[in-house]
Image (tube, rainbow, N blue to C red):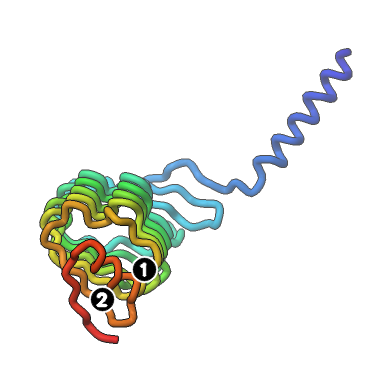
Amino acid sequence: MKKIIAIILAAAAILTVFCSCGKKESEPVTSGEYTYVVLEDNTAKITKYNSAEEIVTLDIPSSIDDYTVSIIGSEAFAGVSTIKVVNFPETLVKIEPNAFTGSSIKKAFLHKSRLLTEIGELAFSECHNLVQVDLPSSLTTLGDKAFYYCDSLMVATFRGDVQNIPALTFDACRNVKIYTKESSQNVIDFAKAYNIETVITGK
């Protein structure tokens, strides 16, 4: 019986080793202003912005400790009240839900993030100071209520034709205008369906 138990335990240990392989994800690491984790693809996800310093413009880095920044995690900048303008890195692939909820940012420049395909639900919700957002041509998906109750938002620039724009993306954004190209038919149709003024900026 003891031999059988020993064999079972040994087999379980081997299975544990095999099951855990490939799951390369670090514990949270703090480096300067940011806490991050290393993902399975050896890129970094920012999980927390730590600085309390008042600054006008924040350039989110394209790499931290030699790891390429690919994701801004859920609630990473939620409630941050010390930043006015954010420039997003060209390496960014995804912004997770609630990433900037309730922050004080006034302008969000994402247009250089040419790998960015997804902005999660409520990502910029209740950013009451936000007046301008510039979205990249690579963007394909906006999460539900991504800009919910950004009641100061006036300019939302779409540089590409986003495929998935939920009905409540700009809910409670009473003064927003959408700036987009003539070729961005999905964006134009969305704006028309929800009575959002549209400015055509080119072909």
Residue 180 — which label? Answer: 2
Residue 109 sits above or below residue 16 on the image: below
Q: Amino acid at mark 1?
A: Val
Residue 162's disc is 1
What x and y, as percent, mark residue 201?
22, 82
Amino acid type of disc 2?
Thr
Query: Measured along the vertical axis of the image, is residue 28 above or below residue 186?
Result: above
Q: Earlier in the sequence, mark 1 or mark 2?
A: 1
Instruction: Give the residue drawn at x 21%, y 44%.
Output: 79
73 or 159: nearer the viewer: 159
* Side of 170 where 151 appears, left or right: left
- x%, y% of residue 155? 16, 67
- Dot 1: element: loop
**57 sits left or right of 35 in the view:** left
Which quadrant is home to the N terminus? Answer: top right
- Residue 181 in picture, x, y percent from top left: 28, 80
Disc 1/disc 2 C-alpha distance (Å): 11 Å
**111 or 23, which lies in front?**
111
Q: Secondary structure at mark 2?
A: strand
